[in-house]
Every structure is written in C-alpha cells, then in structure tokens.
Amino acid sequence: MEPPVALVDDLKYGQTPLDPDEAAGLKPGHISTQGELDEWEAENLLKARQWLNRYKKQDALSEGFCRELHKRMFSDTWKWAGKFRRTEKNIGCEPTQIALKLHQLLGNVIWWVENDTFPLDEIAARFHRELVWIHLFPNGNGRHARYMADVLLKQCGRPEFTWGRASLAAASEVRLRYIEALRAADQGDYAALLVFVRS
C-alpha cells in the first residue's frame, strides 16, 4: 500500500521526514493528512501517559524501558513502534550506532545523577537533547525524549518540565523557540533550553 503523500512530504519545522517504507508502517488505513495523524497519535500518547502515571518501577534509564515507552506511545499508530530506526536521517547517528550511543548516554546520565555533576534540571535537559540527537526511532523522537526527561525528573523526586506550556506538535512560536533552544544546546549552550523547559 502506498503511504499518503502528506505523511512523507507535509512536514512541520524541525520535523524529521519518514522514508516511504517507514510511512508504509502506518497502522490505521483511514489517515491521509498530517492533521489526522496528529489527532490519532494524540490518543495514543494519552494512553502512554496513563500507563506512565501507573508505572512505579525505578528503571527508566534502561534500553528496555526506552523502547517500551516508545512502543506505548505509538503502538496504535506505527508497526515499528519501539524499534530502532534502520535508515539515515537529517539528524542523528548512523543506525548501526544507535544501541551503543544509547548505552553510553544512559551510563552518563546515571553517573551525572549519582555524582551531582549538574543540577537535576540540567541533567534532564541534557538527557533530552542527547536522545533527540541520537534519534532512536523513525519518528516521535522529540515527544519520546520529552517523556523520558520527565520520567527521570519524576523518579528523582522533581516536578516534570512544563515544555513551554503548549503543544509542541503544532507549528507555533513555542515550537520555534523549542527548536532554536535545542539547536543552541547542540552547540553546547543550554541556557535557552533550561529556560524553555520550565517556561
């Protein structure tokens, strides 16, 4: 089945394109526009949030949890939910390096938390930025990385980030500030991101 052109070509600022094979992994057959996809994914994300609210284990810094969370977020939408990407993107490491880079990042975050390397908000912001950069999955990486940062904060007894108090899925001034803050963090300047996550 040919994927809807809108799912391959109709991208928001900062959104990573799907290749046609990834777009063909769309489960619901009635979706033909990006708006319909956004609505469908929002329902899937709500279920994932409810699962997270019931989740009591303290193992968020593991590959297993990382994959399971993505699967919970997108399993009603994408056949490849929870599976690492196998294609090159306009962002991220080579697909063959994903598992290694994630393992290194999780080890770093555990070290940062145990040794108070940075304030906890900065650890969570750095964790988020690194997950986005590695780009574990074909799609949903920003949303997944935001959930992962919030889980880390929650497990450390801190309130979740507010993420600009707006939906970052829609094209908006808030999304633009978020993308610009991430790009500054890519260059080592976390100031704007640290302000944004609590705005």
Image (cartoon, rainbow, N blue to C red):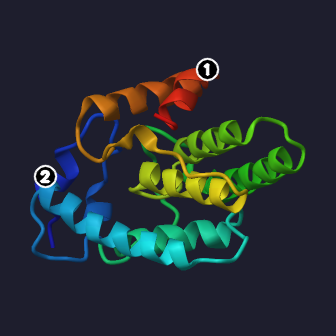
Q: In the image, what residue occupies the spot 44% across and 42% down? A: 163
Q: Which element type, helix, strand or loop, lies under badge 1?
A: loop
The residue tagged 2 is 6
Q: Please say whether residue 167 is visible from this viewpoint.
A: yes
Q: In which quadrant of the rendered image does the C terminus lie?
A: top left
Q: Quadrant of residue 172?
A: top left
Is residue 137 shown above or below 197? below
Please report contact status of discs 2 and 1: CB closer than 8 Å, yes or no.
no
Q: Nearer the viewer, mark 2 or mark 1?
A: 1
> Which amino acid does the dot numbered 1 rest on?
Asp
| Rendered residue at 68%/36% (across/down) | 122
Q: Residue at x 72, y 42 (%)?
A: 120
- Nearer-the-camera pick, 116 or 93: 116
Q: Earlier in the sequence, mark 2 or mark 1?
A: 2
Please tell me how crowded label 1 is: few (under 14), some (14-19), or many (20+) other residues with Cα within 10 Å.
few
- Mark drawn on residue 27: none
Q: Residue at x 72, y 70 (%)?
A: 59
Estimate the x, y position of residue 127 in percent, counting from the top left.
64, 45
Image-based side of 187 in relation to 8, left or right: right
Q: Name the residue under label 1.
A: 189
**Identity, as a three-letter code, of the amino acid under mark 2:** Ala
Q: From the image, which quarter does the N terminus lie in?
A: bottom left
The foreground one among 151 and 130 is 151
Q: Compared to 85, does 170 lie above or below?
A: above
Number of numbered discs on residues:
2
| x and y, in percent, of residue 55 in the image | 59, 77
SS assignment at label 2:
helix
Report how far apart the C-alphas of labels 2 and 1 lie in the structure: 34 Å
Q: Vertical placement of 162 versus 62: above or below?
A: above
Tell me if 33 is positioned left or right of 62 in this view: left
Q: Nearer the viewer, residue 104 or 85?
A: 104
x and y, in percent, of residue 169 in the image: 29, 47
